[in-house]
Image: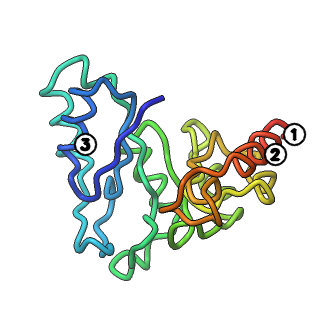
């Protein structure tokens, strides 16, 4: 699958995904606004779904994967809304998949967060969006899949090149599930 995610540029992700024939977009502000490292991220569900519809049937085939309580963000304005409630709201607003992450890049996702989201939205795929390593992949066996980056790079740093040994270790760990 080919995907695109652009922080806070919700309609642009759909437009670029359509032009590039991509399969899905990762939306960091689908429901509930929040403060991210890029600044204020507006909730976009209604506007984004209407925009995708206006672009036509090819755009409607692009799946929307909604980040739930996005990493690198403060959620003080929604502190009264749990992770599970946020997931339920995203599902109600017709996202195609949910992404649950840790607090920042390479930070492990709390397995209890996966469980809470799975319980409240059993009909929607749930992906782990950060912190997946060969050593902990078994903690997330109930996930629909994993978004993996840093742990596959030299020294586990996102900006480094891929490390063949780390990639092989991840493949072996996933196969053992």
Where is residue 96 drawn, in percent x and y? Answer: 44, 36
Q: Is residue 11 left or right of residue 168?
A: left
- Which label is found at residue 173? 2
Secondary structure beneath label 3? helix
Question: Is label 1 in contact with label 2 (beta carbons under 8 Å)?
Answer: yes
Q: Residue at coordinates 49% horizontally, 47% vertically from top-left?
A: 98
In the rendered image, residue 63, in percent from the top left (x then y), is placed at 38, 32
Q: Is residue 162 left or right of residue 40?
A: right
Q: Nearer the viewer, residue 124 or 151?
A: 151
Percent position of residue 176, x then y:
87, 39
**Res. 94 visible in picture:** no
Question: Element type at marker 2?
Answer: helix
User: N-terminal of the two: label 1 or label 3?
Assistant: 3
- Say whether marks 3 and 2 touch (CB < 8 Å): no
Q: Nearer the viewer, residue 137 or 94?
A: 137
Q: What is the C-alpha distance between the residues marked 1 and 3?
A: 35 Å
Residue at left offset 24%, top offset 58%: 8
Q: Residue at x 22, y 63 (%)?
A: 42
Identify the residue at the far right of this view: 176
- Label 1: state its secondary structure: loop
Looking at the picture, tell me which residue is in the foreground, 139 or 21: 21
Query: In the picture provided, is 120 more to the left or to the right than 21?
Result: right
The answer to which of 150 and 97 lies nearer the viewer is 150
Q: Residues within 10 Å of mark 1 (few under 14, many from 20)?
A: few
Residue that numbered label 3 is attached to: 13
Q: Residues within 10 Å of mark 3 (few under 14, many from 20)?
A: many
Task: Identify residue for label 1.
Answer: 176
């Amino acid at each position: 699958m080919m995907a695109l995610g652009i922080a806070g540029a919700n309609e642009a992700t759909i437009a670029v995904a359509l032009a590039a024939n991509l399969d899905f977009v990762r939306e960091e502000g689908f429901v509930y606004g929040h403060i991210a490292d890029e600044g204020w991220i507006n909730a976009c569900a209604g506007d984004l779904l209407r925009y995708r519809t206006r672009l036509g049937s090819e755009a409607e085939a692009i799946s929307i994967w909604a980040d739930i309580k996005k990493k690198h963000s403060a959620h003080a304005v929604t502190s009264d809304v749990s992770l599970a409630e946020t997931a339920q709201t995203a599902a109600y607003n017709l996202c195609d998949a949910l992404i649950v992450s840790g607090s920042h890049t390479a930070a492990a996702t709390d397995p209890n967060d996966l469980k809470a989201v799975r319980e409240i939205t059993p009909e929607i795929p749930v992906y782990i969006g950060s912190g997946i390593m060969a050593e902990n992949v078994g903690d997330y066996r109930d996930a629909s899949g994993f978004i993996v980056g840093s742990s596959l790079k030299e020294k586990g740093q996102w900006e480094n090149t891929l490390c063949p040994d780390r990639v092989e270790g991840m493949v072996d760990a996933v196969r053992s599930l």
